[in-house]
């Protein structure tokens, strides 16, 4: 169990003691270093932002930089930093290494859908290796924000709605990024974010305020942060938004009482971009100097900023007593300790030749393909249309603009990727069916479609897109003709990569750009149709669920995504992913999550609306395979246990098919009575189990007091009730196989 603390050596203490207050304050400022293709002025940034940064480096007033991915630039700026610092202190380079750097892995929600901590750890190990090779020391990841409102675009960056799954994913990501310890070779600091509660933005509107009860914070939103901290995360990033009326970045209760005392975090805290300056924007701080004082006194160590820093005014605040030197020293000490742990005080430079070799490692691309295969979720497969038998297909139609878009195959939060090497779904199917007997045809079917309002990332250009001015009728007619002439149609639909992620909330879950009409026209031809979905949030699939036999969610599958999709469609890979969220039928049901309480009339839970079901289209934990599994013979190691004792639940899992497969067996608990009304079900165990065709294996879960403990608003403290627990084990959150046990007084 670690707490993210970098040990403070005598060398660091001596260095700290030799620094002036102005030098110390300089260490607490982190600048973006934007290298925009066009002049910064076009991008709305004042003057040339890079000049501002290089002036700060020369004056020893920058302790960290972000948005540098080129090793030569990293070395150049590092030389400037060392030269500008009176004690030769190098800068810490941080970056958004969210799902890969040069090798792009499936987006984080996809990795979570694998329910495979080992796969997730491996993905972030590769990402860390590439990042460290180019001079990046720290990832602003994992994003561990629980998301129960899919209108919020950043759900793609997290692990969904459930704290138990999200905690396992968070810990796996931290292990992947950091390795065995802070400063491990070819590893980087993990920076879980955004502390805390950001995913509960009202209306799913990114950046908007959050109001969360203490019980929601402690039982739902904080456990993934606790898991990341216990896994040793060296950094935490504070969130943008107001939490219960106080901006997270200036919230002493949050950043000190909760984070330091409640969760035991001992690493360093960075703000989100400009979120310290934003304390004035929120009308919380009186002005920029006040914003700096409020943030520092709340517990913020490092200010991330694009332009003039609020911390640039701390010199006066120190002089007039609004902040004290001891508080500044505490932050500087944490950052110097991290720099020493990473070896930067001895050698802060990178080997540019070695970086090129690491970035080109073919093993990384293979790992990305395997991660894409392990993340896909088979939502429907009526009549076992999948896997397709290449021998029975002479002509296969691939339809939809997303099928042929490299950028949309990669998803958001990508910067140092190689677009040309990216394998789209169309590319993957074509290369998979290379024998001449199978003809692969393609039709976009709809003109390229776009957001109503531009993405914040447009400054990097939106790359490959089909023609937005194409003739819609002609496109559709061509798609219908292409489907009619084919034995099978693979329709690739979803959202463009700029329709999901930061600043990408939306008010509906409809398929954008007339894609539903395209799908309906293709199905109307009578050609057997498979839907391949590229999305990072649930979309309205009600019509598809009724009319399309096979639906495969492949998320944004990354650099080798098309290869993975082809392997899944033709059976060289078997889908085994499970949904990390409940899939609403329509936006009107939001928020929709499985861990609700019984409340009044539980028998009518599915009919809470008179105009629509109030159940999800697909439940949390749902995911089919080409194999089929059955559960039987549940058992408990004891019918009754003491409060501090564990109980073991066992169950048989049988593969009733002729296809080997991997099943994610899930265990859910419900407490029948106690200090609070508890959710009808809570995930409290899962195991990925390979089961060969026709075989049965016994799976066991241990339920310790930790899985039964929760924070009660009745006692305003953590409780372990004496009560009766219902236990369900099965293939998703609607599992019916039941047993129970009692916890004695
Ligand atoms: C962004 C995001 C944060 C990211 C940071 C640096 O606005 O909120 O997740 O790490 O700024 O890019």
Image (tube, rainbow, N blue to C red):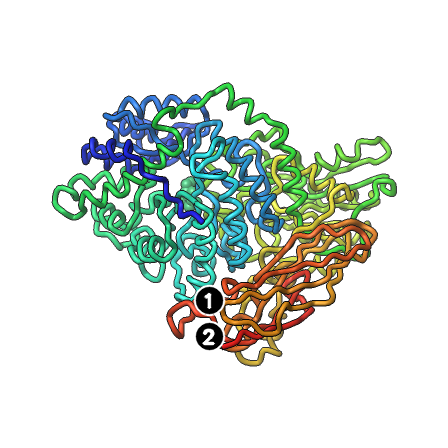
Q: x, y percentage for residue 690?
A: 72, 50
Q: Which of marks 1 and 2 is nearer the N terminus?
A: 2
Q: Would you say 692 lies left or right of 666 here? A: right
- In this rendering, is residue 524 above or below 423? below
| Residue 676 disc label | 2
Determine the residue located farthest toward the bottom in the rendered image: 601
What residue does disc 1 label? 710
Q: Is residue 283 left or right of residue 453?
A: left
Indicate which quadrant contains ligand 1.
top left
> Residue at the spot x=32%, y=23% of the render?
80
Identify the residue shown where x is 40% and y is 71%: 713
Nearer the observer, 458 or 307 = 307
Question: Where is 32 relative to 173, above or below?
Answer: above
Q: Position of residue 540 (x, y in %)?
A: 62, 58
Q: Which residue is drawn at 26% across and 55% down?
A: 284
Query: Is residue 468 in view?
Result: no
Which residue occupies 64% across, 68% down? Answer: 636
User: In terms of image quadrants, where is residue 607?
Assistant: bottom right
Residue 640's spot in the image, x, y percent?
Answer: 58, 74
């Amino acid at each position: 169990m670690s707490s993210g603390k970098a040990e403070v050596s005598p060398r660091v203490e001596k260095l700290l003691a030799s620094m002036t207050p102005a030098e110390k304050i300089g260490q607490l400022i982190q600048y973006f270093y934007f290298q925009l293709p066009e002049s910064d002025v076009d991008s709305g940034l004042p003057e040339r932002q890079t000049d501002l940064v290089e002036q700060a480096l020369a004056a020893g007033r920058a302790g960290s930089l972000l948005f540098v991915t080129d090793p030569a630039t990293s070395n150049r700026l590092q030389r400037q930093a060392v030269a500008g610092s009176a004690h030769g202190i190098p800068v810490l380079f941080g970056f958004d290494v969210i799902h890969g750097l040069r090798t792009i892995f499936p987006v984080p929600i996809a990795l979570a859908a694998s329910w495979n901590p080992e796969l997730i750890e491996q993905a972030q190990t590769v990402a860390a290796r590439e990042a460290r090779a180019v001079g990046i020391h720290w990832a602003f990841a994992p994003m561990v924000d629980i998301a129960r409102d899919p209108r919020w675009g950043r759900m793609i960056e997290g692990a969904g709605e459930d704290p138990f799954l999200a905690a396992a994913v968070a810990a796996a990501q931290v292990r992947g990024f950091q390795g065995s310890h802070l400063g491990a070779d070819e590893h980087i600091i993990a920076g879980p974010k955004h502390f805390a509660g950001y995913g509960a933005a009202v209306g799913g509107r990114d950046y908007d305020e959050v109001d969360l009860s203490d019980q929601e914070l402690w039982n739902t939103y904080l456990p993934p942060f606790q898991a990341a901290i216990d896994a040793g995360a060296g950094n935490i990033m504070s969130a943008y938004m107001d939490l219960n009326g106080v901006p997270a970045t200036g919230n002493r209760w949050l950043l000190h009482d909760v984070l330091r005392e409640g969760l035991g975090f001992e690493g360093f805290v960075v703000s989100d971009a400009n979120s310290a300056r934003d304390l004035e924007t929120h009308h919380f701080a009186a002005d920029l100097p006040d914003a700096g004082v409020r943030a520092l006194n709340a517990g913020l160590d490092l200010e991330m900023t694009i332009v003039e820093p609020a911390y640039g005014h701390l010199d006066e605040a120190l002089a007039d007593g609004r902040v004290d030197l001891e508080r500044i020293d505490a932050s500087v000490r944490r950052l110097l300790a991290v720099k020493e742990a990473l070896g930067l005080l001895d050698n802060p430079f990178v080997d540019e030749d070695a970086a090129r070799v690491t970035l080109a490692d073919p093993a990384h691309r293979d790992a990305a393909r395997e991660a894409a295969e392990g993340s896909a979720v088979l939502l429907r497969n009526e009549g076992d249309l999948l896997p397709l038998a290449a021998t029975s297909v002479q002509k296969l139609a691939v339809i939809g603009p997303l099928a042929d878009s490299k950028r949309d195959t990669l998803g958001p939060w990508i910067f140092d990727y190689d677009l040309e090497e990216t394998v789209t779904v169309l590319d993957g199917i074509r290369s998979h069916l290379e024998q001449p007997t199978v003809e692969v045809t393609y039709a976009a079917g709809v003109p390229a479609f776009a957001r109503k309002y531009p993405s914040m990332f447009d400054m990097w250009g939106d790359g490959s897109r089909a023609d937005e001015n194409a003739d819609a009728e002609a496109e559709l007619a061509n798609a219908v003709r292409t489907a009619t002439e084919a034995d099978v149609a693979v329709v690739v639909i979803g959202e463009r990569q700029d329709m999901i992620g930061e600043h990408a909330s939306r008010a509906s879950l409809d398929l954008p750009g007339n894609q539903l009409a395209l799908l309906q026209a293709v199905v109307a031809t009578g050609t057997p149709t498979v839907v391949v979905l590229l999305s990072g949030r649930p979309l309205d699939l009600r019509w598809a669920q009724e009319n399309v036999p096979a639906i495969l969610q492949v998320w944004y599958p990354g650099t080798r995504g098309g290869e993975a999709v082809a392997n899944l469609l033709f059976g060289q890979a078997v889908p085994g992913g499970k949904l990390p969220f409940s899939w609403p039928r329509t936006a009107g049901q939001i928020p929709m999550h499985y861990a609700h309480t019984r409340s009044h009339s539980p028998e009518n839970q599915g009919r809470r609306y008179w105009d629509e079901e109030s159940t999800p289209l697909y439940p949390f934990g749902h995911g089919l395979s080409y194999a089929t599994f059955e559960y039987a013979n549940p058992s408990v190691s004891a019918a009754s246990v003491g409060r501090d004792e564990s109980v073991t639940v066992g169950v048989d899992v049988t593969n009733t098919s002729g296809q080997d497969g991997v099943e994610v067996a899930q265990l859910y608990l419900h407490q029948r009575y106690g200090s609070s009304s508890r959710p009808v079900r809570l995930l409290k165990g899962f195991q990925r189990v390979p089961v060969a065709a026709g075989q049965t294996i016994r799976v066991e879960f241990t339920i310790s007091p930790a899985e039964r403990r929760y924070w009660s608003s009745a006692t305003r403290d953590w409780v372990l009730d004496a009560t009766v627990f219902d236990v369900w084990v099965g293939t998703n959150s609607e599992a019916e196989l039941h047993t129970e046990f009692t916890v004695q007084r």
